[in-house]
Image (spheres, rainbow, N blue to C red):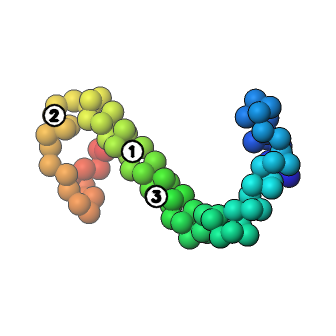
C-alpha cells in the first residue's frame, strides 16, 4: 500500500493509488506482469555493473595519485616481502 501511495505522490497527482493498484492487479491476472526471474536478473546485473564501475573509479584514481616509481614497479602476487611497504 505504501509503495502505491508513494508512486501516486511522485506522479504529481495525475494518477491515484487505487488506479495503480488496479493496473498492477490487471497485469498480474493477464500474465503481463514482469516475471520474478527477470526482475531478479536485472537487479543482479545492475549490482554487478555498479561494483565494476566503482572498482574502475578507484583504480583510475589510484593510478593518477601514485608516483611514477610506484606505478612502474612490478606487482608481486602472492604478496611477498618485496611489496611489504604497500
> Badge 2, how many Cα within 10 Å: few under 14, some, many 20+?
few
The image's mark for residue 69 is: 2
Q: Is residue 3 left or right of residue 71?
A: right
Q: Is residue 8 left or right of residue 51?
A: right
Q: What residue sits right under mark 3 in the picture? A: 45
Circle 3 or circle 1, nearest the eye = 3
> Badge 1, how many Cα within 10 Å: few under 14, some, many 20+?
few
Residue 86 position within the rendered picture, expressed as x and y whole percent measured from the top left: 31, 44
Nearer to us in this view, 55 or 24? 24
Question: At x 63% / y 65%, what residue is drawn?
Answer: 32
Q: Secondary structure at mark 2?
A: helix
- Displayed quadrant of residue 33: bottom right
The span from disc 3 to disc 1 (Cα, nearest Å) is 12 Å
Q: Is residue 16 visible?
A: yes
Nearer to us in this view, 58 or 38? 38
Residue 46 position within the rendered picture, expressed as x and y whole percent measured from the top left: 48, 53
- Displayed quadrant of residue 26: bottom right
Q: What residue sits right under mark 1 in the picture? A: 53
Q: Secondary structure at mark 3?
A: helix
The image's mark for residue 65 is: none
Q: Earlier in the sequence, mark 3 or mark 1?
A: 3
> Badge 3, how many Cα within 10 Å: few under 14, some, many 20+?
few
The span from disc 2 to disc 1 (Cα, nearest Å) is 26 Å
Position of 41 relative to 54 (above/below): below
Q: Secondary structure at mark 1?
A: helix
Amino acid at each position: 500500500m505504501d509503495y502505491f501511495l508513494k508512486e501516486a505522490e511522485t506522479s504529481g497527482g495525475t494518477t491515484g493509488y487505487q488506479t495503480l493498484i488496479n493496473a498492477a492487479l490487471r497485469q498480474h491476472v493477464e500474465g503481463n506482469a514482469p516475471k520474478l526471474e527477470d526482475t531478479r536478473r536485472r537487479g543482479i546485473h545492475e549490482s554487478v555493473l555498479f561494483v565494476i564501475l566503482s572498482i574502475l573509479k578507484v583504480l583510475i584514481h589510484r593510478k593518477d595519485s601514485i608516483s611514477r616509481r610506484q606505478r612502474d614497479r612490478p606487482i608481486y602476487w602472492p604478496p611477498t616481502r618485496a611489496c611489504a611497504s604497500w
